[in-house]
């Protein structure tokens, strides 16, 4: 995978796409983490992901369509989200959980049941990990509308209509979903929809970002960062 990225993507540096390089350095500095390598890959699917290989410097890959879709602030929020995975060692724990699951499948009967339970818990953990990284994005952007706008655009945005999208309307949509799924039947359907998803629904992620941006914990982190920089 490392060789594939070197061979089929552009490695970002101070001499190659310097604006992207600066965004990564700034985001890594805010989160107090060593910046990984950053690659840009040609793809019509807007996406970004992180890979950490044992003994190798971790790297982040972003697709060209994502660069076209987002503003510079939104793009830095995406980079911060990916840095959140590295900051929290998510790759290490994901590998550990996968090994446990594979080991359980080797034993028939009870082992299969244990493996299924581990998979369910792993997927729940994956969804929680994405929410954690959304918080990393907010810590760098320091504006909930920037982080939420990323989710809105990935849900149904396109470059030609990006200026017509409304974050407040998307948050209202998130509250409508929460209200519609609060009944017993709605709760059941919501769980059925999300049970096998590795990422929470975009409207739920938007709501979580909005709520955490109003929390005492978030304000305390920003105040501490301000004091450290003085």
Image (cartoon, helix red, strand yellow):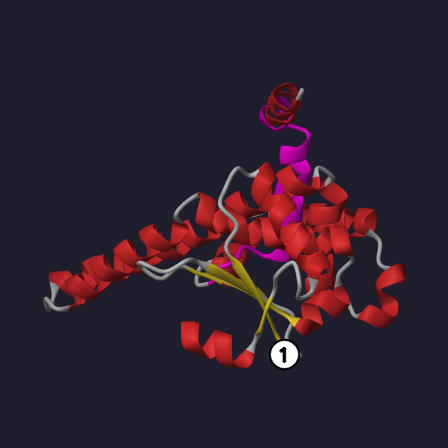
Residue 9 position in % (x across, y down): 56, 76
Going 57% across and 44% down the picture, which residue do you hit? 28
Residue 212 horizontal side relative to residue 34, left or right = right
Would you name the residue on which mark 1 appears?
43
Asked if residue 13 shows in the view, the reply is yes
What is the chief secondary structure element of the magenta stretch? helix
Residue lying at 26% horizontally and 54% vertically, measured from the top left: 96
Circle 1 residues within 10 Å: few <14, some 14–19, many ≥20: few
Specify whether residue 203 is in view.
no
User: Quarter of the image holding residue 8?
Assistant: bottom right
* Spot occupied by residue 185 in the image (x, y as percentages of width and height): 55, 54
Secondary structure at badge 1 equals loop
Q: In the image, is residue 144 above or below residue 122?
A: above
Viewer-side residue, 17 vs 152: 17
The magenta stretch spans residue 219: yes
Look at the picture and state if 62 lies above or below 77.
Answer: below
The foreground one among 79 and 104 is: 79
Quarter of the figure that contains the N terminus:
bottom left
Q: Which residues are magenta?
A: 197-220
Q: Position of residue 198 (x, y in %)?
A: 47, 60
Q: Is residue 47 above or below residue 199?
A: below
Quarter that holds the C terminus:
top right
Q: Which residue: 12% across, 69% down?
A: 106
Specify whether residue 29 is painted magenta. no
């Amino acid at each position: 995978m490392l060789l594939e990225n070197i061979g089929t993507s552009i490695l970002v540096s101070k001499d190659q796409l310097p604006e992207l390089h600066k965004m990564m350095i700034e985001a890594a500095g805010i989160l107090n983490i060593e910046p990984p390598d950053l690659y840009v890959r040609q793809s019509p699917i807007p996406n970004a992901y992180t890979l950490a290989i044992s003994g190798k410097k971790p790297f982040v890959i972003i697709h060209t369509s994502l660069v076209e879709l987002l503003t510079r602030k939104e793009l830095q929020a995406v980079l911060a989200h990916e840095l959140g995975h590295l900051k929290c060692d998510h790759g290490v724990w994901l590998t550990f959980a996968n090994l446990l699951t594979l080991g359980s499948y080797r034993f028939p009967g009870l082992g299969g049941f244990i493996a299924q339970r581990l998979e369910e818990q792993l997927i729940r953990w994956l969804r929680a990990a994405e929410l954690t990284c959304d918080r990393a994005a907010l810590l760098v952007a320091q504006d909930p509308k920037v982080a939420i706008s990323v989710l809105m655009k990935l849900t149904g945005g396109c470059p030609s209509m990006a200026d017509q999208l409304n974050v407040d309307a998307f948050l209202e949509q998130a509250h409508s979903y929460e209200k519609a799924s609060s009944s017993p039947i709605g709760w059941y359907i919501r769980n059925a929809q999300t049970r096998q998803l590795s990422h929470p629904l975009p409207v739920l992620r938007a709501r979580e970002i909005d709520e955490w941006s109003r929390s005492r914990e978030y304000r305390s982190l920003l105040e501490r960062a301000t004091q450290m920089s003085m």
